[in-house]
Image (cartoon, rainbow, N blue to C red):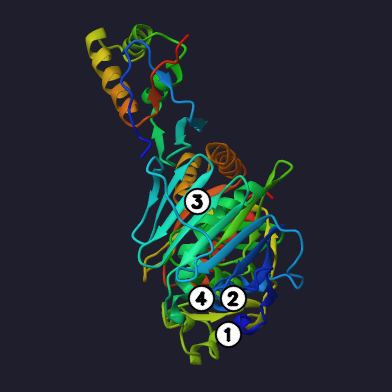
Amino acid sequence: MKKQAKMCPRETPVKNPRVISREIEGQTVLLNLESGEYFVLNSTAAVIWNAVGSKSYERIVGRVAEDYKIGKPAADEAVGQFVDQLLHEGLLCERAAE
Amino acid sequence: MNQSARPIERSILTDNRESFSASYQTGGAVTQVSATEERLVHSIDGFMGSSRLADGQGNHHISFRLATADRPVWAYTRPAEAGLLYACPFFKCWDLGHRRWLEVPGKALVCADLNDNIAFASIRSAPADSAWIIAHYVFYPLWTQMLKKTELYHLHAGCVGLDGKGLLLPGPSGCGKSTLSLNLVHHGFEFVSDDTVFLRSSGNRVIAEGFAENVKVSRETAALFSELAAVRNQAPDPARQKLEFDVAGVFDASIKGSAVPTAIIFPRFTRGGKTIIKPVTRAEALTLLFDYSMFMADPASSARHFEMLTGLVDKAACYEAEIGADNRASALMIRKVLEEVPA
């Protein structure tokens, strides 16, 4: 199976280039082009997904804390769990060497 | 119509071995099936026969070659580094780059090159009723992947038309696609396909090309339609106990080669009660379409396939339906849905 989560530093997740996404009427649909597996993200998850790669982990946590009016520790836990899940599903991977 | 009785082209190769072949057209793509034994080509011909080309030696886009395992023409070797791409109770598929390996336990080994659009299948000696397995488990899964190279994307769906509007009916095997398609045809819709379409882009439109396979129904479904009185007296095929017929020869219906889908209904039979049709979100419709498509291709083809399906849900109105036993009422409800969606 190609679904191998590659552990990478929490602050540097990037999207798997083999994953394609499309927002349709407020829902974000992801398709892993290699495995054919697909995922539908709710609006909170879509905020995190859209920020990955362009914002630091800390800024994503700050954005979620602000948008949902929760403390940073709670936002950190929620974002961390989601990022771990994306890594596990192979939707995120290690940042490419720069 | 018994297409299997049609003669298969025979030739003698340079090493004096016999080769049998036939070619088929699907949405503009030509597939040549060749084999070391005539019965192997007949297995595919029973499935594809109505799209057979009269001249079997034209230019082809896809080549599918079959041989029996006791008279091998090539060696099957699946590299250890190939990754498992797809597994179901009937077969497994592995990939490595543009190569695919498909194994049907106890029945066949197949390898395909998606760049060259060529596949080789090694078939174990098997009784005559294995024709269905050869067509559906050995040929079909990799053939649909090779068709993507010609920009034709498989979708497990029935399709009918009405006044220039197409209606897709996607769903898994046994969900009632054929029954619903025939019910709509019985009530004046045009027939495109009852089980499979191939999607292709034309400008900014998505077109559903019908698949010329004969319709196969259970005795229970055949009993629903007066047009199928004679079909009910046929012997069912031994493998699946289905009755097979050509819609054009049985129903007084207009047959269309293709349609532009303006609506999609995901049907589910309830075996009773009244038909209920309700909208589904486009995202939900997209993921349901993923379920009825086969993504076992290279990432570039899968990306185009994804775009094709998102283009489809962008343009078509999407519904799910619980189909009740009220055949006439359900046909009228679906007609109303299709009349109300913009062309």
Residue A67 visible to the viewer: yes
- Host chain of mark 3: B
Within 10 Å of the Cα at label 1, are there few (<14), some (14-19), or many (20+) other Cα atoms? some
- Host chain of mark 4: B
Q: Nearer the viewer, residue B324 or B305?
A: B305
What is the three-letter code of the residue carrying label 2?
A: His
Q: Which residue is mark 2?
A: B186
Q: CA distance from mark 3 to mark 1?
A: 31 Å
**In the rendered structure, which disc, 3 or 1, sits on the residue that comes first in sequence?**
1
Q: Which residue is mark 1?
A: B227
Dot 2: element = helix
Q: CA distance from mark 4 to mark 2?
A: 16 Å
Q: Are marks 3 and 1 in contact (CB under 8 Å)?
A: no
- Whether labels 3 and 1 share one chain: yes
- Whether labels 1 and 4 share one chain: yes
**In the rendered structure, which disc, 4 or 2, sits on the residue that comes first in sequence?**
2
Foreground mark, 1 or 4, reads: 4
A62 on left or right of B287: left
Q: Are marks 1 and 2 in contact (CB under 8 Å)?
A: yes
Q: Please provide percent x and percent y for residue B229.
A: 53, 89
Q: Which residue is mark 3?
A: B293
Q: Please provide percent x and percent y for residue B12.
A: 68, 74
Residue B262 visible to the viewer: no
**In the rendered structure, which disc, 1 or 2, sits on the residue that comes first in sequence?**
2
